[in-house]
Amino acid sequence: MSLHADDLPAALTVTPLTAPPDVSLRPPGSKSITNRALICAALAPGRSTLTGVLFADDTHAMLGAVRALGAGLTVDEAAHTVVVDGADPRTATGEVSVDARQSGTTSRFILPAVALRPARGVVDGSPQLRARPFAPLVDALRELGATVEDLGAPGFLPVAVTGPVAGGKVALPGHISSQYLSGLLMAGPLMTDGLSVELTSQLVSVPYVEATTAVMAAFGVSVDGLRVAPGSYRPAEYDIEPDASAASYLLAAAAIGDGRVTVEGLGERSLQGDVRFADLLEQMGARVERTAAGITVTGTGTLHGIDVDMADISDTAQTLAAVAVFADSPTRVRGIGFIRGKETDRIGAVVTELRRAGIDAVEDADGFTVNPGTPAPTAFETYEDHRMAMSLALLGLRVPGITVKDPKCVAKTYPEFFVDLSRL
């Protein structure tokens, strides 16, 4: 049976490890960087070439979005390459419609870009995406001069936006999602007056904003603090590094499987904050080696519980929950209350599913506590959330009888996850 997401059954039982893993793997390209690079390339008049591109549901959504924005695309999935012929949206005519599917990054990055157009644009998504909050971004675009029409419940998709957006100063909350800020920053240089953002609350997921500004710099735009001067992007040749969030599952497998896994391509100069997940495994007792070429985690047979604020690397919180099950003391994760607004309530969901397997887990407002235990054979719900599926599957490497329902949901960011898991 093929283990690619397209070919998976309605439920998949994970095969436990028969020996400690000893492998080197390269995860797919970073979703977050792929979608940032696609936006910047689409806004850069001229031809850009992106290599190492992730092809998954979220990036296919962005490909459709930038095509609607006016970019020309030549896609070679086999070579993980996209050639982008960018266009200035400020000269666009005619109404456009963007289906962001289930992709939060696509919707929150494309909406400010669509607001650069002098014509009407509609942005919508799946029912799951329609349930995610957009009010801070919509309010900011209105404050910057765009006309935004609520086509459904106020503060949620779908919306219609008509530009051009003038730019200038805007206040924005930082505690809900950093994606609002990233989307505004990437559109900022094409705003008539540039952009200056004042955060009204503490910013979460700071490394993702740092990745945004790094990608912008590669396309010729500099960000000074949270200010972007009026200007333009330059086309570029840009290579996308592997996905650090995806790598977390492979590195976690080494720690809980008492083996050795090397993730290639995620070097010490990675743009992604989620490479710091390896630091947490090290704190728990695993050995970690970092080089310019990649990260190696070796399980030592002992894992200790930790108390950690994961606000900056929240996409790996569920991965840590799975590892924590096999520690010798409780693990407390803090600072991630905002992930209740992701694909699902990730705090409530991971606690519910661990309890389903007989693990003592407790949620609170901004995180959870996992007490160690031995998971019982369980068929896990995954809530249409790729990170729930991939995290809970890790339990099946240590104990038999772990089944993941709707494993196809990994197609959102890591279509070959179960292929790579089988290579362990």
Image: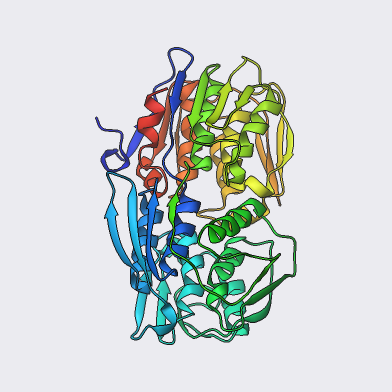
Q: How many marks?
A: 0
* View extreme (top): residue: 19
The residue closer to the viewer here, 233 or 245, is 233
Q: Residue at x 29, y 48 (%)?
A: 77
Task: Please state the horizontal and vertical placement of residue 219, each as a whole percent of the image.
Answer: 50, 61
Q: How is the image coloured?
A: rainbow
Compared to 54, does 332 lie above or below?
above
Name the quadrant containing residue 74: bottom left
**Camera-side residue of 258 and 265:** 265
x and y, in percent, of residue 31 in the image: 46, 50
**Residue sitting at 72 percent across and 49 percent down?**
335
Closer-to-camera residue (85/285): 85
Looking at the picture, does residue 271 appear above or below residue 195?
A: above
Quadrant containing the C terminus in the rendered view: top left
Residue 360 point in image, percent of width and height: 65, 32
Is any atom of residue 2 visible in this view? yes
The one nearer the camera, 105 or 187, is 187
Up-down: is 110 above or below 244?
below
On the question of residue 351 being in view, the answer is no
Residue drawn at x 68%, y 30% as measured from the top left: 371
Q: Is residue 11 shown left or right of residue 24?
A: left
Instruction: Give the percent coordinates (x, y) of residue 26.
Output: 43, 33
